[in-house]
Amino acid sequence: MPNVVTNGAMCRCAFSATTAPLKVTSQMKLSIEGKPVATICDNQPFANIGPFGMCTNPANPAVAAALGAPQPCTPMTGTPWMGANPKDMAGNYPILTDTCTTMCAYGGTITIDSAGQVKTQNQ
């Protein structure tokens, strides 16, 4: 079963070795563990998804200009996250889960590396 994504979740791009935190701005009413729940609309570069360190995608114009040498990431997301269940809503938007993906305009798939929740196990 997918985990619900919350503020502070870690995202990963297929063309970078580092992760970037997700910042929730689409809604502030529904929370888990005191953290706002993310929706598919938390997809904007820099406002929601930060840079992933160095980009290695040859389709990135900065990497191409540097003859394939890694260059600083500039996330170019613009479409909502895909794969959310349209029945699970936070406000007017489907809730983001750790199985959802979005794309960078340069071709990298962005995934959720860590949902941002801390799970407590009963012993």
Image (tube, rainbow, N blue to C red):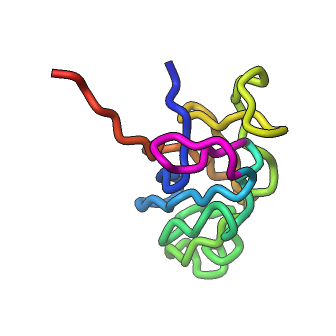
Q: Is residue 32 magenta?
A: yes
Look at 68% across and 52% down and name the residue there.
Answer: 28
Q: Is residue 61 visible?
A: yes
For the view shown, which residue lies furthest in the right direction?
A: 92
For the view shown, which residue lies furthest in the left direction?
A: 123
Which SS type dominates the magenta stretch?
loop
On the rendered structure, is 18 left or right of 94? left
Q: Is residue 61 above or below residue 21?
A: below
Look at 41% across and 59% down and name the residue there.
Answer: 17
Q: Nearer the viewer, residue 23 or 71?
A: 23
Quadrant of the image containing the C terminus: top left
Residue 119 percent location from the top left of the image: 34, 34
Q: Nearer the viewer, residue 112 or 67?
A: 112
Q: How many marks?
A: 0
Residue 115 percent location from the top left of the image: 47, 42
On the rendered structure, is 79 left or right of 46? right
Q: Is residue 14 visible?
A: no
Look at 58% across and 77% down and name the residue there.
Answer: 67
Residue 116 percent location from the top left of the image: 45, 46
Q: Is residue 41 above or below residue 119?
A: below
Look at 64% across and 37% down and name the residue there.
Answer: 96
Where residue 38 sits, quadrant-wise, is top right
Residue 79 percent location from the top left of the image: 81, 49
Q: Is residue 121 above or below residue 17?
A: above
Q: Nearer the viewer, residue 21 or 38?
A: 38
Q: Is residue 54 magenta?
A: no
Question: Which region shows up in magenta?
Answer: 28-39
Q: Nearer the viewer, residue 97 or 55?
A: 97
